Amino acid sequence: MRWRDIPAAIAASGRNYLCGRVSRAFTLRVIGPLTNGGFALGTTLAIACLPTAYDVRHTWVSSLASARTNPSGYFYLGTTLMVVAVLLVPLPGHLSRQFRTRGRVSVAGSLLLSVGIAGLFLLSVETTVFPNPGRTRFVHQLFTAITLIFLTLGFLSFGALAAFRAWITRANLLPASLACAVLSIPAIGAGLTHLTRLGMEALGWSSLRAAKLETPFFLTLVFWEWAAVIALFVGGYLTAWAAPRDAPRPPP
């Protein structure tokens, strides 16, 4: 390759990346480990910078990205979220191409994933560029909800497609089933926990701080928030694993 051809090659690679024209091996061996490992590293750094001891039982994930509660470490998690959003950019195009025979469901899954990735990127920008030291963080909560809901629904769409395809072709159902279970359980658990809390608040239970602290960990919304975040990384990887293998390219 000549030197003058390098910019064109870089531009072509960038277009392929944005459009999701990446291989299954690249998705599983590069994007997956980088996103999961990067998030784990950023979270660890954010926890290490907290001015107080971090109690995973009662402290929200968003507290790690708060300029008010974590003034020295919020930038680490915010930057990590930005990197993760960029790494996830090829997934909507890649997964929709793997399931291109499924038409509308594949397009819907790709759209849901794209909205979730956009929400994640905006969340990272809000965290790092426009940190809010106040108690109320409506924009942060909005972007968090968009990210969790749309990414989960997007991965679930492709996970369901993978399960349906495996059932029809009598292939291995385990990867797709695991993906759907991992992605679904946090949403179901959070819903049941919310209903439990509403019932206890109606009885005046929530006014007792001691009772809150004695609540089993798995009955707190903090637990299910962590579960939902972890499920996105694990379930997303399982969804990519359950997707059909790359079709052979036609000869030139």
Image (cartoon, rainbow, N blue to C red):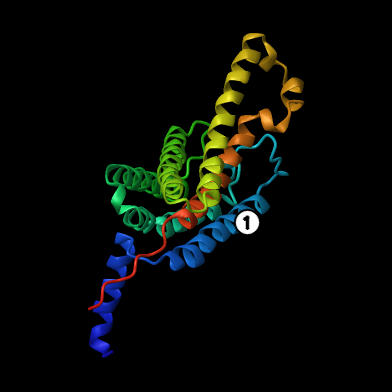
Question: 195 or 169: which is nearer to us?
Answer: 169
Q: Is residue 99 visible?
A: yes
For residue 181, what is the image quadrant?
Answer: top right
Q: Eyeballing the image, is 28 above or below 136?
A: below
Question: 249 or 185: which is nearer to us?
Answer: 249
Q: Is residue 66 visible?
A: no
Question: 222 or 195: which is nearer to us?
Answer: 195
| Residue type indicated by callout 1 | Leu
**Residue shown at 52% from the left, 53% from the top:** 172
Q: Position of residue 4 (x, y in %)?
A: 23, 87
**Residue shown at 49% from the left, 63% from the top:** 28
Left or right: 121 as drawn, with respect to 111:
right
Label 1: how many Cα within 10 Å (few below 14, some 14–19, many 20+)? some
In the structure shown, which secondary structural element does the residue marked by tag 1 occupy?
Answer: helix
For residue 11, what is the image quadrant?
Answer: bottom left
For residue 5, what is the image quadrant?
Answer: bottom left
**Residue shown at 33% from the left, 61% from the top:** 20
Question: 195 or 132: which is nearer to us?
Answer: 195
**Residue shown at 51% from the left, 42% from the top:** 180
Q: Position of residue 9 (x, y in %)?
A: 27, 78
